[in-house]
Amino acid sequence: MVFTMALASIVMHVWDVPAKDTLQLLWGSPFALKWEDIAALVAIALALVFYIAKNFRTISGIFFDQEIAQSLGMKVKLHHTTMVLVIALVIAFAMKLLGALLIDALLILPVLIASRHAQSLRQLFLRSCAVGVFVSFFGFIAAVATDLPPSGTIALLSALLYLLSTKIKKGKIS
């Protein structure tokens, strides 16, 4: 999905297809961000990092097995509800600002890429964040250098990195 949508975004830009404004929710653009939007996203991100750091053991237990976590006295429903609400808030906020294409490229693909090589939940968190930062930074640089839409360029880089990661299994190229 991300790969084809990224190509569609770039093709629409190169051939100057009309009706780009009507697709703002789908494509989005980091160039359209205001300082208030950035401040709100930073606040949500900091709250999320604080929540995960404070409750990492509980979250790990819930991800591993909810029934065991509950039998150990962990507040499974509270943390599950909190995580769902925070994720929904992040997606709703970011979709307005960045578009569905970037949400898919920056929330789903980095986790899929990192999960192929992570051996613990902590590694998965750290590696998926690193992949997200990598594709965001280099995709944005490539978009500016080539005068292409940032959302499509970032998503295309993310999709290509995912395809490459599927060919590399635990250090071996297949």
Image (tube, rainbow, N blue to C red):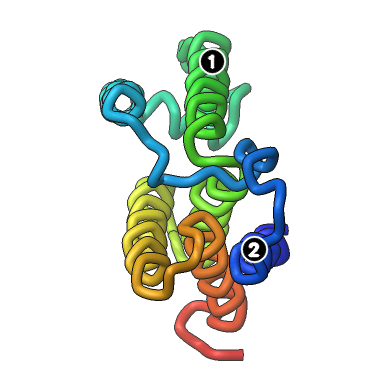
| Amino acid found under the numbered disc labelled 2 | Asp
The answer, for residue 69, to whether it is visible in the render is no
* Residue under the image location 40 percent in, 55 percent down: 132
Quick one: 168 or 61, which is closer to the camera?
Answer: 168
In this figure, which residue is indicated by the disc labeled 1?
76
Instruction: Tell me if mark 1 has few (under 14), some (14-19) or many (20+) residues whose alpha carbon lies within 10 angstroms of its own.
Output: many
Disc 1 versus disc 2: nearer the observer? 2
The answer to whether 128 is drawn above or below residue 113 in the figure is above
Question: Could you say which is closer to the camera, residue 150 or residue 62?
Answer: 150
Where residue 112 sits in the image (x, y, percent)? 57, 58
For marks 1 and 2, the one nearer the N-term is 2
Residue behind mark 2 = 16
- For label 1, the SS is helix
**Distance of label 1 from label 2 (alpha carbons):** 50 Å
Q: Position of residue 130 (x, y in %)?
A: 33, 57
Assign the C terminus to one quadrant of the image.
bottom right
Mark 1 in CB contact with mark 2 (< 8 angstroms): no
Q: Is residue 82 left or right of residue 134?
A: right
- Residue 87 in sight in this render: yes
What kind of element bears circle 2?
loop
